[in-house]
C-alpha cells in the first residue's frame, strides 16, 4: 500500500509524523530514507511528539540509537536509530538492533544502507526535498505487510 504526501515546511513534516504516531503499535518499524536535509529528523520529531515525548529529539548521528521510554501510562517506548555512520551489518548486531526490533516503536534513519536486515512487515518513509522549493518535502509512504498497512488507512 502506498501514499504520497507533500509537506510545505518542517512544521507540516512534523504534523505528518504526529498523525502517523496516533496509529502506531508495539513492534512498529519505520524505515526513514532520503538525502541529508530531507526532513527525516523532522518526521521523527513528529512521531516522538505524537507518542508523548516531551524532551528534545535530535538525530542520534553520533550516539547511533536514542531511547525514549514511555512518559505516560499506555505510551509506547520509542527507539530512534541513525545508521549514517555505520558501514557493516555486524555493527547493527553489536548495537542489538535486530534483536530489539520487536520492542516498542523503531524509527531508523538511513535504513536503506542495510536493506536486508528489516522485518518484512514495516513502513518505508522516503522523504525528498523539492529541487525548486527547498522547504517543500515529498513524503512517500510504503507499507509492506498487513500490520503497517493499517498506518496508511
Image (tube, rainbow, N blue to C red):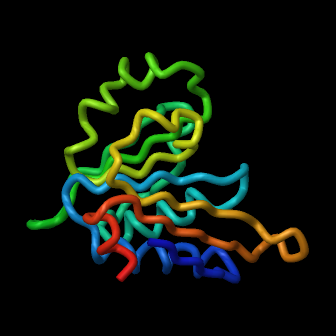
Q: Give the answer, above or below, for where 54 lies relative to 67.
A: below
Q: Is residue 98 above or below residue 25?
A: above
Q: Is residue 103 left or right of residue 17?
A: left
Q: Residue at x 20, y 45 (%)?
A: 103
Q: Quadrant of residue 84?
A: top right
Residue 106 place in picture, x, y as percent: 34, 50
Q: Residue at x 34, y 70 (%)?
A: 149
Horizontal and vertical percent for residue 78?
Answer: 30, 53
Where in the figure is residue 129, as x and y percent of width and height?
76, 66
Residue that appears at 71% across and 64% down: 128
Q: Nearer the viewer, residue 37 or 152?
A: 152
Q: In this image, 28 relative to 72: left or right?
A: right
The answer to whether residue 70 is visible is no
Q: Quadrant of the N terminus?
A: bottom left
Rendered view: 91 above or below 8: above
Question: Which x, y percent locates residue 148?
Answer: 32, 65
Q: How many marks?
A: 0
Residue 135 lies, with reference to residue 148, above or below; the image says below
On-image quarter of the C terminus: bottom left
* Residue occupying image coordinates x 32% and y 63%: 53
Amino acid at each position: 500500500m502506498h501514499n504520497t504526501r507533500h509537506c510545505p515546511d518542517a512544521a507540516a513534516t512534523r504534523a505528518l509524523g504526529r498523525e502517523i504516531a496516533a496509529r502506531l503499535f508495539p513492534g512498529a518499524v519505520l524505515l526513514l530514507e532520503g538525502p541529508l536535509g530531507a526532513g527525516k529528523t523532522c518526521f521523527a520529531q513528529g512521531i516522538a511528539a505524537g507518542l508523548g515525548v516531551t524532551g528534545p529529539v535530535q538525530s542520534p548521528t553520533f550516539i547511533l540509537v536514542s531511547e525514549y521510554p514511555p512518559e505516560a501510562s499506555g505510551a509506547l517506548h520509542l527507539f530512534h536509530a541513525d545508521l549514517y555512520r555505520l558501514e557493516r551489518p555486524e555493527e547493527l548486531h553489536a548495537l542489538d538492533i535486530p534483536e530489539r526490533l520487536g520492542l516498542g516503536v523503531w524509527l531508523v534513519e538511513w535504513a536503506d544502507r542495510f536493506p536486508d536486515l528489516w522485518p518484512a512487515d514495516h513502513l518505508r518513509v522516503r522523504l525528498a526535498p523539492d529541487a525548486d522549493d527547498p522547504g517543500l518535502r515529498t513524503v512517500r509512504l510504503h507499507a509492506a505487510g498487513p500490520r503497517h498497512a493499517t498506518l496508511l488507512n
